[in-house]
């Protein structure tokens, strides 16, 4: 299911089926919807999905021993990743229509 379709279901709980771009209720009646509001909701769903994916891909950077100087090698810029993930987490919790994604840090390892 695409985000636009999911947004229709989220915003219009009376909709039980969608065929193309037409939404229907339980009695088969057409449910009119606001395409601008639906697109905004779809953009937020996309934002949340992207943020969740980024968090999953960078989970390993927040493990304590990854950045511990007691280990060799260790991630010397773990704090950069923690800051980055904090911004991304904000989008996962409070998705927005037009997120400004920060640049992911490049791994820097001790030698």
Image: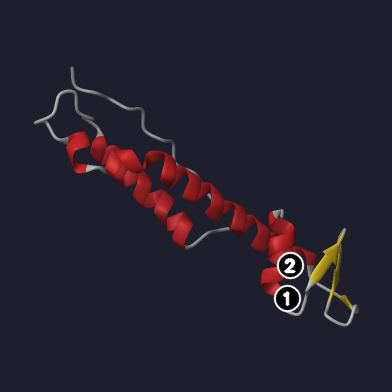
The spot of residue 102 in percent (x, y) is 44, 41
- Taking depth in this image into account, of 95 and 67 the one nearest to the observer is 67
Q: Secondary structure at mark 1?
A: loop
Q: Is 15 placed above or below 106 here?
A: below
User: What residue occupies the far right of the structure in this picture?
Assistant: 29
Who's the residue at 36% across and 46% down the image? 85
**Disc 2 residue crowd, few under 14, some 14–19, many 20+, Cα 10 Å:** many
User: What residue occupies the far top of the structure in this picture?
Assistant: 111
Who's the residue at 19% across and 35% down the image? 67
Who's the residue at 49% across and 44% down the image? 101
User: What residue occupies the far left of the structure in this picture?
Assistant: 70
- Taking depth in this image into account, of 42 and 17 the one nearest to the observer is 17
Query: Which quadrant: the C terminus?
Result: top left
Q: Secondary structure at mark 2?
A: helix
Q: Are marks 1 and 2 in contact (CB under 8 Å)?
A: yes
The spot of residue 71 in percent (x, y) is 13, 29
The spot of residue 25 in percent (x, y) is 83, 78
Q: Which residue is mark 2?
A: 8
The spot of residue 36 in percent (x, y) is 75, 64
Q: Which residue is mark 1?
A: 12
**Quadrant of residue 68 within the rendered picture:** top left
């Amino acid at each position: 299911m695409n985000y636009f379709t999911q947004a229709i279901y989220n915003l219009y709980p009376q909709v039980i089926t969608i065929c193309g771009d037409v939404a229907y209720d339980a009695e088969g009646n057409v449910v009119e919807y606001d395409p601008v509001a639906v697109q905004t909701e779809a953009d937020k769903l996309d934002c949340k999905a992207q943020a969740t994916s980024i968090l999953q891909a960078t989970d390993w950077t927040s493990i304590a021993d990854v950045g511990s100087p007691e280990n060799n090698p260790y991630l010397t810029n773990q704090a950069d990743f923690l800051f980055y993930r904090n911004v991304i987490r904000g989008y996962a919790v409070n998705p927005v229509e037009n997120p400004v994604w920060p640049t992911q840090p490049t791994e820097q390892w001790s030698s």
